[in-house]
Structures are given as structure tokens and as C-alpha cells.
Image (cartoon, rainbow, N blue to C red):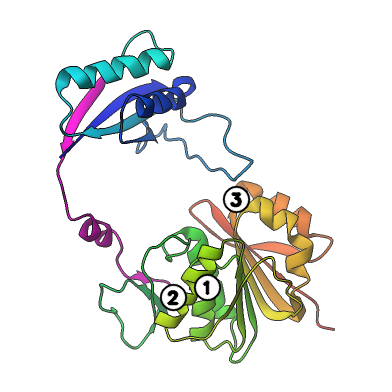
Amino acid sequence: MWISVTLHADADKAEALSDALMEAGALSVSIEDADAGTDAEKPQFGEPGHLPTSLWDHSRVIALFDGGTGTPELEAALAEASRAAGLDAVPAFSTTEVAEQNWVQLTQSQFDPIRITDRLWIVPSWHQAPDAGAINIELDPGMAFGTGSHPTTRLCLEWLCEAVTPGCSVLDYGCGSGILGIAAAKLGAGDVLGIDIDEKAVEAARDNAARNQVSLRLQHSAVPVGDTFAVVVANILTNPLCVLAPAIAARVAPGGRVALSGVLETQAGQVIEAWAPYLALEVGACLDGWIRLEGRRPAA
């Protein structure tokens, strides 16, 4: 049994209160938008080195305490944290008991099969494939990004369904879980190379490829890539896409195609401008505030 405590705080105090609660004995602390689900909801997106300057105007700080913590001890911890965060008093708060659960089963219940197109599905291992005749990728949530549920992954998968031709070569730049490379291989690609800056992602992609009985070449991004590819896909983040524009663009073969995602609608111009010296890009599709940029290198 645990005790979940929800406190309300303004943007300038939420992070300080979160840190102070951890120092006061909380087992974990999270911060959420108190206006979530209303017209005042304020989405937050950030990248390493370019994080949002502030949190939500009205935040919920949720702290988890051991269930053995008595009321006086809990109130003392909240008072201590509030003082440390520079608050005049303990904010209004509520508590709920969190019972022991089968956390594995609870996590699994949040992931159902995902239909990308009539042709392609992403299916967690604990589910039966809804369409046995479709291309089904078996993939479970793990440490590496990419389960098919995020809009950017879906945008790239939809594009691969159209861009991959039998036997073509594919580069998945920033492969994460390997989902895009696996999809490309199952869609009929020949040579598929996945690279990532995170060695754990490379390992996860290798395991997922084996589970799906496809052959991928996988390597760390520090290893030079000298080949060019008919299809290049990069689902990373805006700033890396801009910095790596010359390196990724150079991997697109004459007549080849490229798709980029991990880009918000408001960031499209930034990426298009960064890529302009190497390849012309245009917006190919949008989903939930994210976009897919597409380009083609002229045939030699």
C-alpha cells in the first residue's frame, strides 16, 4: 500500500516543491498540468538543451509516500517540503491510497494492437493478431523509443508502407526499438540498416528483429556509414535533424526518398531551411501537432 498526495502549485514553485518532496521522503514525484482536459490545457514539448522555459501555469504535483507513513509524519513532510520550496504554507492537497497491483498486467492492458494501415499492424506479444493475413510486427514496450503508438512513429510507418519497394535498400537513422527497420524488412526491403546513438537501442532493435524473424544490419551511430539508400527515414528530434542534415542527406541515393519526423508543426520551417542546401523538403502529413517532412534526391 502507498499514499499518493496531490498538491497544487503555480509554475514558479512546482519544480522546487517537487525536489523538496523528494528530500522530505517521497518515493517518487511527478508534475502534471492541472488544467489538462480543459480549454486551458497547455501542451509542453522540449528537447535536450532546448527545454520549455516554464511549466504549466497551474500544476499538480503528485508525490508517492510509503503506506506506513502516519498522518502526523505525512503532514510534517509536506510542511518541511513547502518551507524548503519557499511557500508560506502547505498548498491545498488530497490523498488517496494506492493498493498493490499486478503492475505488469496493468501496463499490458494499456497497449492494444495498433492498426497502421489495412496492410500493417503492431501487435504486443500478449495479444492475438486481429488480422492474421496482414503484416504483423510483434513489439512490446521497452527502454527504446518506438511502439507504434506515438504520432511520429505512425507517420513514418504509413510512409514506409508507400515508399518501400521490393528489394530496396533502407536506412533507419535513429532506430530506437527497430520498429521502422523491421517494418521496412517485412514490407519487402532488401538491405536494411538501423543506427542509433544509444547502444541499448541497438540491442533492443537486434532483439526485436530476431523476434520478428527479419534480418537488419544494426550499428552505433559513431560507426561511419558510407552507403547510400533508396529509402531513408529519421524519426528523431528537430535539433538533431537540423545538425545532422548534411550527414543524413548524403545517405539518400540518386532518385532516393527521405522522410523525417519528430518535428512539431511549428518547427517545419526550421528543418526545411536547415535541409535546403542538401535536399528540398515539404510537409507530407500531419498528425496531432506533429508532421512528416518528405524529400527526393533527383535521379543522376
Question: What residue is pinned by disc 1?
Answer: 180
Q: Earlier in the sequence, mark 3 or mark 2?
A: 2
- Residue 242 at x, y percent in the picture: 72, 54
Q: Disc 3 or disc 2, which is closer to the eye?
A: 2
Q: Is residue 58 visible?
A: no
Q: What secondary structure is marked by label 2?
A: helix
Can you tell which quarter of the image residue 259 is in? bottom right
- Residue 44 at x, y percent in the picture: 50, 39
- Residue 234 at x, y percent in the picture: 62, 66
What residue do we see at 42% from left, 17% from top? 85
Q: How much space separates mark 3 and mark 2, taking CA atoms? A: 31 Å
- Residue 230 at x, y percent in the picture: 69, 82
Q: How much space separates mark 2 and mark 1, taking CA atoms? A: 11 Å
Magenta stretch contains residue 298 = no
Magenta stretch contains residue 115 = yes
- Near mark 1 (Cα within 10 A), the count class, few <14, some 14-19 or many ≥20, is many
In the image, residue 159 sits, relative to residue 56, either above or below, namely below
176 or 115, which is in the foreground? 176
| Quadrant, the C terminus | bottom right
User: In the figure, is residue 171 to the left or right of 226?
Assistant: left
In the image, residue 145 sits, relative to residue 163, either above or below, namely above
User: In the figure, is residue 117 to the left or right of 253?
Assistant: left
What residue do we see at 58% from left, 50% from top? 264
Kind of residue indicated by mark 1 = Leu
Question: What residue is pinned by disc 2?
Answer: 208
- Near mark 2 (Cα within 10 A), the count class, few <14, some 14-19 or many ≥20, is many
Q: Which residues are magenta?
A: 93-117
Question: What residue is pinned by disc 3?
Answer: 265
What residue do we see at 35% from left, 26% from top? 21
What residue do we see at 20% from left, 28% from top? 95
Kind of residue indicated by mark 3 = Glu
Q: Tell whether label 1 touches label 3 (CB within 8 Å).
A: no
